[in-house]
């Protein structure tokens, strides 16, 4: 005879009895049931997850050489540990501090001026009623995203150097010659402007997708209340875009120390090193000089700062929106 007890809901359960073999198997089967039900999805995600781990997480093991005096003959594991000495060398050198300053300036300018350009472009495209014109403008603004900076850099160098179309137009307008690619200030202006031009169309597509999800009843209700198209944009469209803007802003902050290696490397020259030398070009020079430990320390510093900014921005967004906005 078995003991029994009564739960709060009146259900009578056995006490002091071990589960039977069939009961254990049933429990195990019920535990694996969700995995068997989603076996197709699990198999589908297995390969991308393996590629992600293999190429994004396994190489992180190499970060240990930032704390070592890495020597090729000793290998990554047998090289001598030096603690934070590479980071002391990194921050005591004037070249890295100059690269860090230039990276922050270029990234902040690009984020400050370029963040709102895709929003404005998406709003303008959304207001176009001529489908053919809308698709044409959208295609023309989206195409530059697919061009490599090897090609775009060559085109801009050809257009902006002395005797090029833009230089000739400026001089024919009566202005003096502008050294777009050899003046440190003008070179930063060119970097920021061309970078925004290349990425604005791609980012605008994301905002257009967000605009497509807005409930048309909101516009109808605003029109019934007498709101003009401009007021509908201010009080309906923009508030609905805020979550997307916050997510993209947080992700952009994570790349604040990525000033665009491809663009800078293909367009800069020794005369603008003072304003165009960024962390990525500094790392490249350290790698060419075979100072792998210092290059790894610089790259690790950049990644840690980016992660800290993402976490801080996400925390701030969730705190200000009382948990409604943010990435996680």
Image: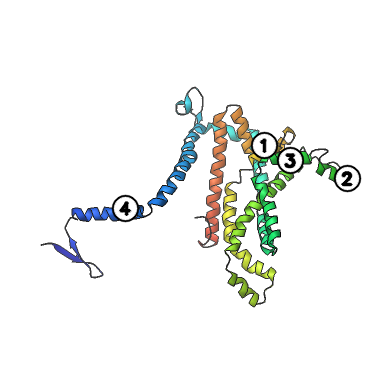
Q: Which residue is mark 1?
A: 265
In the image, residue 95 above or below residue 260: above
Precedes in sequence: disc 1 or disc 4 = 4
Of badges 1 and 3, nearer the viewer stands 3
> If you read the primary sequence from the N terminus, does the residue marked by circle 1 or circle 3 appear first?
3
Instruction: Choose the circle earlier in sequence order: 2 or 1.
Output: 2
Q: Which residue is mark 2?
A: 172
**Label 3, label 4: how far apart the Cα atoms are:** 58 Å
Asked whether disc 3 touches disc 4, contact meaning CB atoms under 8 Å apart, the reply is no
Q: Which mark is residue 155?
A: 3
The reply to whether residue 142 is visible in this rendering is yes
Distance, label 1 to label 3, CA atoms, is 14 Å
Of residue 262 and residue 321, the one placed in the foreground of this image is 262
Name the residue: 30% across, 54% down. 31
Q: Residue at x 52, y 59 (%)?
A: 318
Mark 1 or 4: in front is 4
Residue 321 occupies quadrant: bottom right
Q: Is residue 101 visible?
A: no
Q: Where 224 sits versus 198, above or below?
A: below
Chain-order first, disc 4 or disc 2: 4
- The residue to which callout 4 is attached is 32
- Mark 4 or 2, closer to the camera: 4
């Amino acid at each position: 005879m078995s003991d029994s007890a009564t739960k709060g809901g009146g259900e009578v359960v056995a006490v002091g009895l071990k589960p039977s073999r069939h009961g254990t198997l049933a429990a195990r089967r019920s535990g694996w049931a969700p995995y068997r039900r989603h076996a197709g999805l699990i198999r589908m995600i297995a390969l991308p997850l393996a590629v992600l781990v293999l190429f994004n997480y396994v190489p992180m093991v190499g970060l240990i050489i930032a704390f070592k005096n890495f020597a090729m003959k000793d290998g990554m594991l047998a090289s001598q540990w030096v603690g934070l000495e590479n980071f002391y060398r990194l921050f005591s050198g004037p070249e890295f501090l100059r690269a860090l300053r230039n990276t922050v300036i270029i990234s902040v300018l690009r984020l400050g001026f370029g963040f709102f350009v895709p929003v404005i472009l998406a709003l303008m495209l959304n207001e176009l009623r001529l489908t053919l014109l809308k698709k044409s403008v959208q295609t023309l603004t989206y195409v530059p995203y697919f061009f490599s900076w090897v090609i775009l850099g060559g085109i801009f160098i050809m257009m902006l150097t002395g005797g090029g179309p833009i230089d000739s137009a400026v001089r024919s307008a009566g202005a003096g010659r502008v050294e777009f690619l050899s003046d440190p200030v003008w070179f930063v202006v060119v970097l920021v402007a061309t970078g925004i031009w290349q990425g604005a169309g791609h980012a605008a597509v994301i905002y257009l997708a967000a605009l497509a999800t807005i409930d048309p009843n909101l516009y109808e209700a605003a029109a019934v209340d007498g709101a003009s198209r401009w007021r509908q944009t201010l009080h309906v469209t923009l508030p609905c875009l805020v979550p997307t803007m916050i997510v993209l802003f947080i992700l952009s902050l994570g790349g604040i120390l990525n000033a665009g290696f491809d663009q800078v490397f293909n367009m800069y020259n020794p005369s603008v090193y003072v304003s165009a030398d960024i962390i990525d070009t500094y790392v490249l020079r350290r790698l060419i000089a075979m100072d792998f430990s210092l290059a790894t320390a610089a790259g690790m510093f950049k990644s840690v700062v980016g992660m800290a900014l993402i976490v801080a921005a996400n925390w701030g967004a969730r705190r200000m929106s009382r948990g409604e906005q943010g990435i996680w």
